[in-house]
Amino acid sequence: MGLLPTYQKLLENNQEWAAEKLAEDKDCFSRLANGQSPPFLFIGCSDSRNPIETITQSQPGDIFVHRNIGNQVLLTDVNVLSVLDYAVNVLQVRHIIVCGHYNCGAVGAAIMGSASGIVNNWIDGLRELYLSVKPELDLLPTTEDRIKRLAEINVLKQAKNVCKTSIIQNAFLTGRYPVIHAWIFDISKGLIKDQPLPIEEWRQLDLIPDHYVGHSQAIS
Ligand code: CO
């Protein structure tokens, strides 16, 4: 990791960035100001090490974003549900990406039972998830392996929660729905792993319809 930027540097960088963008395309900001129709909704962890636009070389207007500690989709969280509703029903995004990451502090704290303050409440679902799969995780040799595996299990659970929402269930009924993805960002390699969803299992639970066109057939 290089030197951390100073506060003043952030503002200077912004001036420089805006000037460069304008030099490339003098209308870029006036176009952006006219509105957005991003193809992607990203639901990720707040962790500073997985900035989705940077790691996917995306531009302003490409990705509608929601981030919280542990990339959780809680069915009682009006914040994430509002983002999902707006993304699906107004922006009509084509893809929903739920993204966890390795070295996730929330996942580690859920395993250790070491979160403090309000974060402890926020990650209680993660802690419960850990306890439910503890026998499986205990077979892994190191704590780091257990944290990695729980991050993978968590992202699938949160993608499943996306499917459970009335927002997505209604979209399935209309036949016009986004494709749902679960990613893990491996910070130590800088690489995204696209985790396959258990589509057949979710079909049998009636979480997704027979006509669902998943990940492998997704067109763009
Ligand atoms: Co995290």
Image (cartoon, helix red, strand yellow):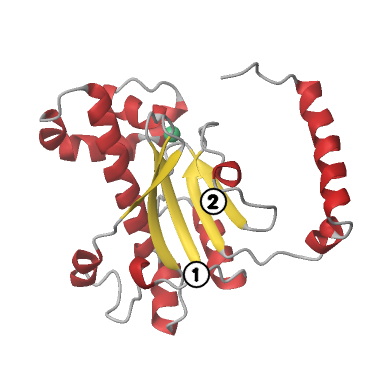
Q: Position of residue 101 (x, y in %)?
A: 40, 38
Q: Position of residue 30 (x, y in %)?
A: 86, 60
Residue at x 32%, y 58% (from the top left corner): 160
Residue labelled with disc 1: 220
Residue at x 36%, y 66% (from the top left corner): 215
Sort mark 1 into few (<14), some (14-19) or many (20+) by Cα contacts within 10 Å.
Answer: few
In this image, 214 relative to 64: left or right?
left
Residue 116 is drawn in which quadrant? top left
Residue 35 is drawn in which quadrant? bottom right
C-alpha separation, residue under disc 1 versus residue under disc 2: 28 Å
In this image, 79 relative to 206: left or right?
right
Residue labelled with disc 2: 79
Amino acid at circle 2:
Asn
Q: Is residue 188 above or below residue 180?
A: above
Q: Position of residue 135 (x, y in %)?
A: 10, 34
Residue 52 is drawn in which quadrant? top right
Q: Tag 1's secondary structure?
A: loop
Where is ligand 1, by quadrant? top left
Q: Position of residue 175 (x, y in %)?
A: 42, 83
Residue at x 81%, y 22% (from the top left corner): 8
Q: Are marks 1 and 2 in contact (CB under 8 Å)?
A: no
Sort mark 2 into few (<14), some (14-19) or many (20+) by Cα contacts within 10 Å.
Answer: few
Which mark sits nearer the N-terminus, 1 or 2?
A: 2
> Nearest the camera: 37 or 163?
37
